[in-house]
Image (tube, grey):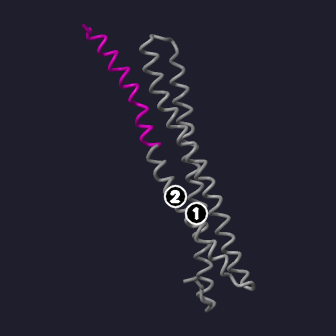
Amino acid sequence: MTSPGDLTATLGVLSAMITPAVLILASGSLILTTSSRLIRAVDRVREILPLMETVEPNDASRRAMLMNQLSKTTMRARMLQHTLSLLYTAIGLFVATSVSIGVIALLSLQLAWIPLLLGFVGAGLLFAASMLLIYESRIAIRALYAEMDYITHLASSGARASRPQ
């Protein structure tokens, strides 16, 4: 039969094992939104190719705008893929943190530094991924502003933006 002290200790271990689940959930949420952003970036690259094929040889400003869009979107896609790798690794480390807490408690080992280290590294990767997402969103907004500036320039000069049908 379990004494009240043992139950309290067991509940403490279970609580500690569940704590990384909050970080796993946060990472999973970031993975979903990052995947969506990556899909949009890939779709944008695929939209630019047909536009590049229809640019007139003497339309240097349109070609420059599309090349700028392609460059920024390619950079974003690579950054988002790297971010996903960081997030997946962070989830693995948070799961390892939870498992190591249970194993260390079960075997009464004096290795509390292991889950602490795993949790810190996972949190560091989550932080790094968040910083990459901030940087990526700034690139995306700069690309959007550049495209809006190009369209504004076309509108003010009386030119028409040609889009293939």
Prevailing SS of the magenta stretch:
helix
Few, some or many C-alpha atoms within 10 Å of disc 2 (few <14, some 14-19, many ≥20)? many
Which numbered marker is on residue 163? Answer: none
Residue drawn at 42 percent across, 41 percent down: 25
Residue 16 on the magenta span: yes
Residue 29: horizontal and vertical position, in percent?
44, 47
Q: Are marks 1 and 2 in contact (CB under 8 Å)?
A: yes
Residue 9 vs residue 112: left or right? left
Query: Residue 118's quadrant in the figure?
Result: top right
Q: Amino acid at mark 1?
A: Ala
Above or below residue 133? Residue 118 is: above
The residue pinned by badge 2 equals 37
Asked which secondary structure carries label 1, the reply is helix
Residue drawn at 36 percent across, 23 percent down: 14
Residue 95: horizontal and vertical position, in percent?
47, 31
Query: Residue 103's quadrant in the figure?
Result: top left
Residue 63 vs residue 10: left or right? right
Magenta range is 1-27
Above or below residue 9? Residue 34 is: below
The residue pinned by badge 1 equals 140
